[in-house]
Amino acid sequence: MEFIEDIVPLRTKNGNNENDSYLIYFDKDYSKDAYESIYKMESSRAVKWKKIKVNGVKANVLILEDNNPYYLSVDGVDTSLPFFAYGIFKKNPLAYSKIKEYVEGEPQECTVSNEMLIRDGVPILTKKMDAKYKASGHLIKFKENKRDEAYEVISKTEPNKLYKWDVIIVDDKWKANALIGKDVDKGSSEFEIHNSEIKNYNGMHDPFFNETMKLIKEFKEKSSEVNVRYLLELQMHYLLLWAAIERYCDLKYGKEKISDNLKEFSEKEDVVKKSIENLNPKRYKSTTVFSAKDLRDYELNLKKPYDSIRFFYTIRCNVVHRRKILMYDDAALLRNSLEDLYEIFANVLKDTFKKD
């Protein structure tokens, strides 16, 4: 108590909840000792100090440190600089909607002289200056009071093993933050040029969002006798569809767990909600499926998008883990699931890659 000069009680709001908290002012001669004592008391956990504003007053707060090595960190990033987006955060493709509310004005089309490669179907920028082909993207400026939030969203989407933050020169004159590839010589290949002198990433060129959907559509439209071969082909195409959906979710949401990605997919994509509302549950003999993995039932519920997506995902898991969809009675379930899920995802792709 000898460190404390004054204590001011506060009522702070977090969403719809109000909480009691306190602003503690330390005697300036003992403030260093006070902060060291507090830190030592919490040292059993991964914590760090952060500067915040509470009711307009600057204050220090001890927060849990994010030790998840999967994600990027914004530590050391100059968030006052604009962001050069050349991949999933470009305007329109995939993840731009996640930062759109923080953007000031319109993203500007621009180029950089850095070499662009491709790894696992996504572009990575290098520090090497490629004089032959420039790489295109968008220069994005964030609202002054939203910069930290915007960079936090980007960092919590992109994997730490693939990217790192760095500053580059855009249009040969502007400084900007960009995601630079890590270990670019490992597993990378040349970026294909499509009728252009510029390297330009477009997620719709991803084979899982293009050729995969064409293959599934062709299979859906052909009729066939229900036999073992047909059941195997049904399973093949259903798993292929899920490979495409999981890739979309992994790129856009960047969660480590598929369950978290599917929650984002079902609850943050309005087109998914609307597509599920338009399904016809009468096509299904039963609107619940049993998961052999966690011993739970999952329901096709038009009012609960996440439950419905888990219904379709559980069918996928049963196919993969137990190969149980080999009974003729399961043919209709798998066929209807393939058709309905295909329409849902086709609507998502159409909405994602639409032109403004």
Image: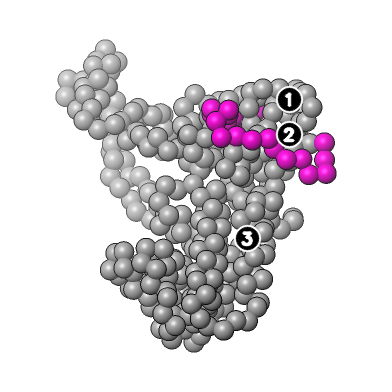
Q: Which residue is at 83% across, 44% downward?
A: 195
Q: Which mark is residue 135?
A: 2
Magenta stretch encompasses residue 204: no
Magenta stretch encompasses residue 191: yes
The mark nearer the N terminus, 3 or 1, is 1
Task: Determine whether the residue tagged by mark 3 lies in a helix, strand or loop.
Answer: helix
Q: CA distance from mark 3 to mark 1?
A: 32 Å
> Which is more toward the observer, 34 or 151?
151
Which amino acid, mark 2?
A: Ala
The quarter of the displayed image where residue 128 is located: top right
- Within 10 angstroms of label 3, few (less than 14), some, or many (20 or more) residues? some
Secondary structure, magenta segment, majority class: loop
Which amino acid, mark 3?
A: Thr
> Which is more toward the observer, 259 or 17?
259
Residue hosting label 3? 212
| Residue 49 horizontal/vertical position (percent) | 35, 27
Q: Which residue is at 58% across, 65% downward?
A: 345
Task: Determine whether the residue tagged by mark 2 lies in a helix, strand or loop.
Answer: strand
Q: Nearer the viewer, mark 2 or mark 1?
A: 1
| Residue 219 horizontal/vertical position (percent) | 62, 72
Q: CA distance from mark 2 to mark 1?
A: 9 Å
Q: Which residue is at 30% across, 47% downward?
A: 19
The quarter of the displayed image where residue 342 is located: bottom right
Magenta-tinted stretch: 176-197
Residue hosting label 1? 130
Task: Determine whether the residue tagged by mark 1 lies in a helix, strand or loop.
Answer: loop
Q: Which residue is at 49% across, 38% downward?
A: 159
> Which is more toward the observer, 89 or 325?
325
Which amino acid, mark 1?
A: Asp
Q: Nearer the viewer, mark 2 or mark 3?
A: 3
